[in-house]
Image (tube, rainbow, N blue to C red):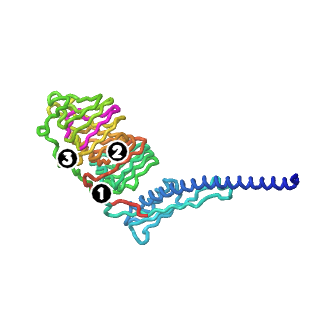
């Protein structure tokens, strides 16, 4: 039986209509999927900006509502939001210690325009407060009393201090805290001694805004007695003697080192793997240097970096501790005794740098360098460190994180925190 020509045309026309409708539905689905992604991305950016703005504003509370609002607006503008898109409210719900920040910036539709949708409403909100007692402790305590930029963060990488760890800078020089480049510094609290100040450059930021305090924090370990050379004795693995210091250099294989005094220091290079037995290691000249691609590790160890008292030049001079390169390292401090939780301690008379590169291992304990600079580079996790030093310099393009633990109690003034 032959199908009438008109009927065939009708069916072909219906199929074409259904095909076109299917294409429209498919395009609409693709448009919706892509634009939903844009909405989520816009929402995330607004929320991050609202959080940072609220924390910035809360740093001026309680007592200065006008400054708090302005700080919040400034912070939001620095993140790309116009003042007309930001609302800062304090007191919030009658509380002078709280500030609410709301950002309302529509996200422009891309493919949704096919369906007549030009933009999507996106709103983010954050509430922050500042209390007089935050429970935060110093992850970084910078002791230098007079130097500008005694805490210096540069480069494109971010510094993130976790677990309620903060920063305190004792310097009276303005600026004592210094940050430049695209990287930000994020901590629970950032304090500086009031005659000092802070300065920022580049696109990064301090979060929360640094706040002034009335008094510097004294060195909590100033009275700690250094190791006694005579009681400790020379290590059976030392490369030299008091009168003839010589670097202990290890370049290959697996080696176990014993505690004691090392006259001339220790160097681990090439593919060597070294295990430090628990105890105290005195580096009497020569320092500690890690290069190459091996692994060094020690549990319950404390390194005291100083000079050879009987030959304090050349091999006996105080030299730096340098943990850099592609080698892996892992150290934890003693769990009891005089040097509990201290992993590295540098004689205050030694003004050389202590250098640590993240991403290749970690340190679990205190890094105490009262007379020198702690230089942190690279990216990755530095471990659960607490740094007490004369100066701090942090650089690099990779993000660096610290899993802070308060080995030494150094309470900081209350800081800002998000509550909603």
Residue farthest to the left, as pictured: 230
Residue 283 on the magenta span: yes
Location of residue 353 with respect to 115 vertically, above or below: above
Point out the stretch of residues depicted in magenta.
280-299
Kindly indicate whether the residue at mark 2 contacts the one at mark 3 (C-beta within 8 angstroms).
Answer: no
Q: Nearer the viewer, residue 349 or 186?
A: 186
Kindly indicate whether the residue at mark 1 contacts the one at mark 3 (C-beta within 8 angstroms).
Answer: no
Give the mark nearer the N terminus: 3 vs 1. Answer: 3
Instruction: Name the spot of residue 138 as percent of width and height, x first.
Output: 30, 53
Give the mark nearer the N terminus: 3 vs 2. Answer: 3
| Relative horizontal placement of residue 172, taking residue 209 as reference (left or right) | left
Spatial CA distance of label 3 from label 2 is: 21 Å
The C terminus appears in which quarter of the rendering? bottom left
Q: Mark 1 highlights which residue?
A: 412
Q: Which of 401 and 252 is in front in this view?
A: 252
Q: Mark 3 highlights which residue?
A: 339
Residue 180 on the magenta span: no
Q: Nearer the viewer, residue 127 or 62?
A: 127
Secondary-structure class at tag 3: loop
Instruction: Name the spot of residue 251 as percent of width and height, x first.
Output: 29, 28
Q: Mark 2 highlights which residue?
A: 382
| Relative horizontal placement of residue 18, taking residue 224 as reference (left or right) | right
Kindly indicate whether the residue at mark 2 contacts the one at mark 1 (C-beta within 8 angstroms).
Answer: no
Q: Nearer the viewer, mark 1 or mark 2?
A: 2
Spatial CA distance of label 1 from label 2 is: 22 Å
């Amino acid at each position: 039986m032959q199908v009438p020509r008109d009927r065939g045309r009708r069916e072909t026309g219906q199929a074409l209509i259904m095909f076109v409708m299917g294409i429209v539905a498919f395009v609409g689905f693709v448009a919706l999927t892509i634009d939903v992604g844009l909405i989520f991305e816009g929402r995330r950016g607004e929320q991050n900006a609202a959080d940072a703005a609220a924390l910035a504003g809360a740093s001026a509370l309680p007592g200065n509502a006008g400054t708090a609002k302005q700080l919040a607006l400034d912070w939001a503008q620095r993140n790309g939001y116009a003042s007309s898109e930001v609302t800062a409210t304090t007191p919030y719900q009658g509380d002078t210690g709280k500030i609410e920040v709301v950002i309302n910036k529509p996200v422009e539709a891309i493919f949704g325009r096919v369906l007549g949708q030009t933009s999507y409403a996106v709103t983010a909100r954050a509430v922050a407060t500042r209390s007089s007692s935050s429970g935060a402790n110093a992850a970084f305590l910078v002791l230098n009393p007079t130097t500008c930029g005694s805490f210096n963060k540069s480069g494109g990488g971010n510094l993130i201090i976790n677990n309620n760890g903060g920063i305190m800078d004792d310097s009276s020089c303005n600026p004592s805290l210094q940050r430049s480049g695209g990287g930000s510094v994020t901590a629970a609290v950032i304090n500086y001694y009031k005659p000092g100040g802070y300065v920022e450059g580049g696109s990064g930021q301090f979060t929360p805004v640094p706040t002034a305090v009335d008094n510097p924090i004294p060195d909590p370990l100033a009275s700690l007695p250094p190791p006694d050379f005579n009681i400790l004795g020379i290590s059976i693995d030392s490369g030299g003697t008091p009168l003839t210091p010589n670097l202990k250099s290890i370049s290959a294989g697996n080696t176990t080192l014993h505690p004691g005094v090392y006259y001339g220091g220790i160097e681990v290079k090439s593919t060597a793997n070294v295990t430090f037995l628990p105890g105290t290691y005195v580096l009497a000249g020569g320092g500690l240097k890690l290069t190459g691609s091996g692994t060094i590790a020690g549990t319950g160890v404390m390194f005291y970096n100083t000079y050879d008292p009987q030959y304090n030049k050349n091999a006996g001079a105080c030299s730096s501790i340098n943990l850099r390169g592609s080698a892996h390292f892992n150290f934890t401090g003693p769990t009891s005794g005089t040097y509990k939780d201290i992993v590295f301690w540098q004689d205050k008379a030694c003004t050389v740098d202590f250098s640590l590169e993240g991403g290749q291992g970690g340190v679990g304990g205190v890094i105490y360098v009262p007379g020198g600079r702690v230089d942190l580079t690279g990216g990755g996790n530095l471990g659960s460190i607490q740094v007490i030093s004369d100066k701090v310099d942090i650089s690099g393009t990779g993000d660096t994180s610290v899993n802070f633990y308060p080995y030494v109690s150094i309470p900081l003034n209350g800081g800002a925190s998000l509550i909603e």
